[in-house]
Image (cartoon, rainbow, N blue to C red):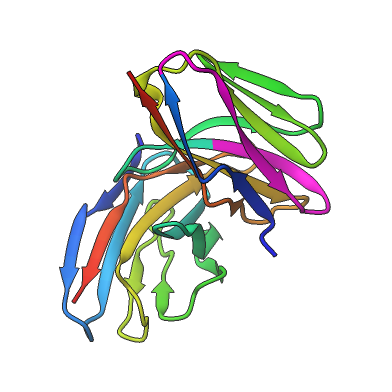
Amino acid sequence: EDQVTQSPEALRLQEGESSSLNCSYTVSGLRGLFWYRQDPGKGPEFLFTLYSAGEEKEKERLKATLTKKESFLHITAPKPEDSATYLCAVQEAGNTPLVFGKGTRLSVIA
Amino acid sequence: DGGITQSPKYLFRKEGQNVTLSCEQNLNHDAMYWYRQDPGQGLRLIYYSQIVNDFQKGDIAEGYSVSREKKESFPLTVTSAQKNPTAFYLCATHNPGHSDEQYFGPGTRLTVT
């Protein structure tokens, strides 16, 4: 069973059409949840770290939220330049390696 | 990917040859990681090192080897024992005690034929 599941696998939006990406996790003790953006052929770019349920972080059109079972990445009024794969990763308590989900491929059409 | 260099960007090898991928960082981070990314598979951890002269196997270490002789460098060797070496390889660094996030290099795409 995957510890980190991202949905949907792919999402196609019209420019300006807001939506959310989901990351659900099953680790027993969460130390941190991380969101990254990855453009094709490039390394992931760090976006947010969330530590506790109820926490929210924002950056431009992106807002990440966290509950005890899942995290959402909300994209408000997206633009074509927001097209990318968004990766979620979790770290269990202790200095354990990150476990990544398979990502959501977002396409924003003008 | 500022501060993390992976070279080369594209690498081609014949089956049966060992190949070494370079990862260098000037961020003064103690921890370094190697991941493999295949289409639809997400990132899978190959090896990681939390301090110089020490490293641990990740989830898919078979067919790979690493060394960590210097803080700045964490080269990955893909050996001929790796059954499916063609993939996108990513190096990352982390500064324990200062922040929790990992920072990634630009990646090396390895093609073995």
Is A30 inside the magenta-drawn segment? yes
Q: Position of residue A109 (x, y in %)?
A: 35, 24
- Going 60% across and 17% down the picture, which residue do you hit? A58
Count of numbered tags: 0
Tell me the quarter of the image containing the C terminus of chain A: top left
User: Where is residue B73, by image quadrant?
Assistant: bottom left
Q: Is B86 situated above or below A107?
A: below
Q: Which residues are magenta?
A: A15-35
Q: Is residue B52 visible?
A: no
Residue at the spot 77% in from the left edge and 53% down from the top edge: A27
Displayed quadrant of residue B104: top left
Q: Is residue B65 left or right of residue A64?
A: left
Q: In this rendering, does residue B10 appear at all?
A: yes
Q: Is residue B85 left or right of residue B62?
A: left
- Residue B100 appears left or right of A81: right
How far across and how far down the image is residue A55, in percent? 76, 24
Residue A22 spot, x, y in % from top left: 64, 37
- Considering depth in this image, is A91 or B112 the residue closer to the camera? B112
- For the point 29% across and 69% down, the residue is B86
Is residue B11 left or right of B51 when viewed as pictured?
Answer: left
Quadrant in which the N terminus of chain A appears: bottom right
**Does residue B9 show up magenta in the picture?**
no
Residue occupying the point 19% across, 57% down: B10
Q: Position of residue B56 (x, y in %)?
A: 57, 69
Q: Nearer the viewer, residue B1 or B111?
A: B111
Helix, strand or loop: magenta stretch: strand
- Relative to A105, residue A101 above or below: below
Give whichever of A75, A52 is nearer the camera: A75
